[in-house]
Image: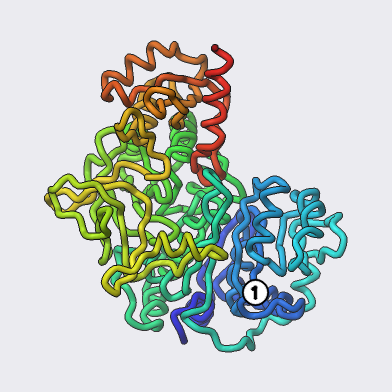
Amino acid sequence: MEFNHADLFEAIADAIGDRTALVCGDARLTYAELDAHANRLAHHLASAGVEAGRHVAIQLYNGVEYAAALLAALKIRAVPVNVNYRYVEGELRYLLRDSGAVALLYDVEFDARVAAVAPQAPELRHLLAVGGASTVPGAVPYADALAARPATRGFAPRSGTDTYIVYTGGTTGMPKGVLWDVEQLLKAFWNPTFPRPDRPEDVVAQAVAGGPMVMMPVAPLMHGAAQMATWIAWWMGATLVYTRRFDAAEVWRTIAREGVNSLTVTGDAMAIPMADELAAGDYDTSSLLAFVSTGAIFTGTVRDRVQELLPNAMVLDRFGSTESGSTAAAVPGSSPEKGLRFAPDVENVTVLDDALRPVEPGSGVLGQVARSGHIARGYHNDPEKTARTFPEVDGRRWLLTGDIATVEADGSIAVFGRGSQTINTGGEKVFPEEIEAVLKGHPDVYDAVVTGLPDPRWGSRVAAVVQPVAAAPDPAELDAHCRRELSGYKVPRTYAFVPEMRRSPAGKADYRWAREIAGKSEKERT
């Protein structure tokens, strides 16, 4: 047995086969049943010519089929590729071509897009339609594919260096595929409350010893955070619960029905509607022990409100990235408004200055958060970005996360924001996350995204796109609110009001869109 996700899941299924592994709506599968389901799919993919190392794209909503597709691809040493189900034809075409996917599993709701794009993806030769009849020529119905294949295994040996890929981004450019060795991925995204395993058998032993824990990632599985939460749950021998798509009321109903103990969301975009629904409804949350944000940061006002609504649950913020794994936890009092501070809970996390040397604690020198050790291999089809992001210093390979930070005297890391989104106005660096958090603290603001617009004098000026709770507040009122919390150069000069904020299904801000909206609003006023 290797540190390989397929090896480990099979061993866990053999050890605790009768334990419930996955629940989604009316579907409920034990570890043994899910393993058998994935075996059938794996045999089908192999029969369709999917070989080791080839890519299998997954354009599905959450469900048994998505989980089975992850397992099935890895069982035959193929590589699952996550597809954002909101992609329009051009974006889908790019991803299928860039990944070189040879097979695509898709929900029939996406028939039109798949029909238009599939002929333009030269390596794509096999289509599996999930959820009913498909109009796409040549597509094989999912149920038929499984019915013709055995539930037994009989697969070739696997390795800890088999590839796992997570496509990420798309809000500031086209998505990029982050490449991992499966062993490094497992160890980078390990549950920090448990010791990291020395042997594959340790993972199985932990799952066997796991209690009746019920865990629920709320984000879509096409987002890396939900996939990693899935594996973490199974390494604990837990029951994993999904909803097919995000709906706050359905999430709370599911928590009550299934007795969910641990919940993961991606920042304010999910936490705000969930808090609104919880405050307005009558839900049993007595089982819930932890409400965790990962992949996006809570603002302080939102986190405080969630804690107020869930007084008996821990409300936690995790810090990390697709390339680094989960690396740190927020310290008490941390928030974008007051300053983000994280304490690393894994080894080899630091801040490197412009010369790629560790920042001295307490010096106030800014650098980038960096990690060595269990990190990604690089980027698919992008050796230049790989070389820039994963430099080698004195024989040691580092990941530069792009998060601008310094190291406090106590060793905690103070994070200011993403370098790629930093606004340089008159020589001053402005981090959008801080301003967004302050704006969302105003009672009339539901959501906010901050960006920079060109300015002939200052280089850039701060602009905010705001989704109000109801009627748009007076910009002068927002200006006064911001000036009470922020230095003058950080206060937005432009406000654009929108009925709905555009974010990814996982809650990530779309900064390209925000910049266009803010610029258009400014032109209309002039």
Q: Residues within 10 Å of mark 1 (few under 14, many from 20)?
A: many
Residue 1 in sight from this viewpoint:
yes
Residue 349 sits above or below residue 314 on the image: below
Residue 304 in view here? no
Of the residues shown, which amino acid type is indicated by label 1? Answer: Arg
| Percent of width and height locating residue 6 | 53, 77
Give the colouring mode of the picture: rainbow
Residue 434 is left or right of residue 376, and the answer is left
| Residue 207 figure quarter | bottom left
Judging by the rendered image, the residue that carries numbered circle 1 is 54
Q: Residue at x 34, y 52 (%)?
A: 319
Taking the image as shown, residue 171 lies to the left or right of residue 308, namely: right
Q: Position of residue 161 (x, y in %)?
A: 48, 79
**Which residue is at 51% across, 81% downward?**
7
Relative placement, left or right, of 97 versus 7 is: right
Name the residue rendered at 74%, 68% in the picture: 123
User: In terms of depth relative to the viewer, which is nearer, 150 or 431?
Assistant: 431
Q: How many marks?
A: 1
Q: For this rendering, which residue is in front, 375 or 331?
A: 375
Please provide percent x and percent y for residue 315. 33, 45
User: Residue 351 appears at what percent x and percent y?
Assistant: 25, 55
The image quarter in which residue 208 lies: bottom left
User: Is 179 drawn above or below residue 414 in the view shown?
Assistant: below
Q: Residue furthest front?
A: 456
Q: Secondary structure at mark 1?
A: loop
Frontmost residue, 95 versus 467: 95
Name the image quarter holding the C terminus. Answer: top right
